[in-house]
């Protein structure tokens, strides 16, 4: 298999460049990450993040043949060759395929990604009806891989002002949580020309999410809730 992988060592290179690799596929190569791990044995300077190998941690998000995805759940057979691997677009590159996610996580923290409830904790747990619990489906599964925000043009230009699809999906996750008591403050926090309304409904985010989530739908639902609930 032929691969072309973006390389960048800030101590040596003025800018990123593509390096070609060739490797024979073996029986145990199912996903792209399997091949990358073997490539790393050939060239231990090749740098990328990975951890769970199961599509759960989100750390091996990268741009694969022009589309963001997770290397560990991308079947390697069938990929068009040479397989071109680049770091997540628009995020500052630290080295090779490793990007700086500072803005991304700052936006995530800006939406207060935790339950806010002033009542004294009950003896065991805060209960929900099955219907209330169902409202979290499609939002709680996000693994914060960054594939969506990195493929969102509105986030490219304003990563410091626009929360981005991943952060907004998490905002929605708490807005619709029946146990959370901070919906008005959460809506107010997003009621801004940039933080929420910079989304232009281009829908790259939903198109690319490797977990099949739909941040653009969540953004639309927040807008509707604002219309109904904010003065
Ligand atoms: S919404 Fe999807 S693409 Fe975006 S961070 Fe969450 S899991 Fe990744
Ligand atoms: S729908 Fe909004 S958040 Fe999603 S990619 Fe488009 S502009 Fe970005
Ligand atoms: S290694 Fe964890 S999501 Fe791919």
Image (cartoon, helix red, strand yellow):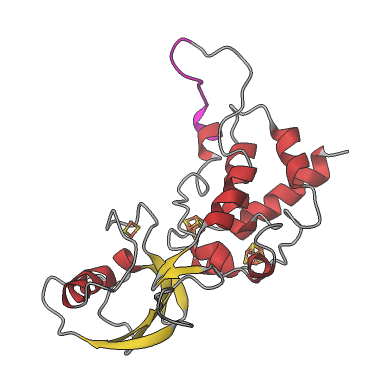
73 and 23: which is toward the camera: 23
In which quadrant of the rendered image does the C terminus lie?
top right
At 68% from the left and 67% from the top, the residue drawn is 154
Q: Could one spot residue 176 in this view of the protein? A: no
Indicate the quadrant where residue 205 lies: bottom right
Left or right of residue 216: residue 28: left
64 and 86: which is toward the camera: 86
Question: Residue 139 appears at what percent x and percent y?
Answer: 53, 47
Q: Residue furthest right?
A: 231
Indicate the quadrant where residue 13 lies: bottom left
Question: Residue 21 appears at what percent x and percent y?
Answer: 25, 87
Left or right of residue 176: residue 212: left
Q: Residue furthest left?
A: 27
Tell whether position 173 is magenta.
Answer: no
Position of 103 relative to 99 (above/below): above
| Ligand 2's quadrant | bottom right
Left or right of residue 226: residue 100: left
Tell whether position 124 is magenta.
Answer: yes
At 48% from the left and 53% from the top, the residue drawn is 144
Q: Could one spot residue 199 in this view of the protein? A: yes
Question: What is the chief secondary structure element of the magenta stretch?
Answer: loop
Q: Which residues are magenta?
A: 123-131
In which quadrant of the rendered image does the N terminus lie?
bottom left
Question: Residue 71 appears at what percent x and percent y?
Answer: 33, 68
């Amino acid at each position: 298999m032929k691969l072309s992988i973006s390389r960048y060592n800030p101590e040596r290179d003025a800018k990123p460049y593509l390096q070609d690799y060739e490797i024979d596929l073996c029986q145990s190569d199912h996903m792209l990450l399997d091949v990358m791990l073997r490539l790393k044995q050939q060239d231990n300077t090749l740098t990328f993040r990975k951890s769970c190998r199961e599509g759960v941690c989100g750390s091996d998000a990268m741009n694969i043949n022009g589309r963001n995805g997770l290397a560990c759940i991308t079947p390697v057979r069938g990929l068009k060759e040479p397989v071109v691997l680049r770091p997540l677009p628009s995020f500052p590159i630290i080295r090779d395929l490793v990007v700086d996610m500072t803005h991304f996580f700052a936006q995530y923290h800006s939406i207060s990604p935790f339950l806010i409830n002033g009542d004294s904790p009950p003896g065991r747990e805060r209960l929900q009806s099955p219907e209330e619990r169902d409202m979290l489906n499609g939002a709680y599964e996000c693994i914060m891989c960054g594939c969506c925000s990195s493929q969102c043009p509105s986030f490219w230009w304003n990563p410091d002002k626009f929360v981005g699809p991943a952060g907004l999906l998490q905002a929605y996750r708490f807005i619709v949580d029946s146990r959370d008591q901070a919906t008005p403050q959460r809506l107010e926090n997003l009621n801004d020309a940039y933080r929420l309304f910079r989304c232009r409904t281009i829908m790259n985010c939903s198109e690319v999410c490797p977990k099949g989530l739909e941040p653009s739908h969540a953004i639309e639902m927040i807008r509707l809730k604002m219309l109904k609930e904010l003065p």
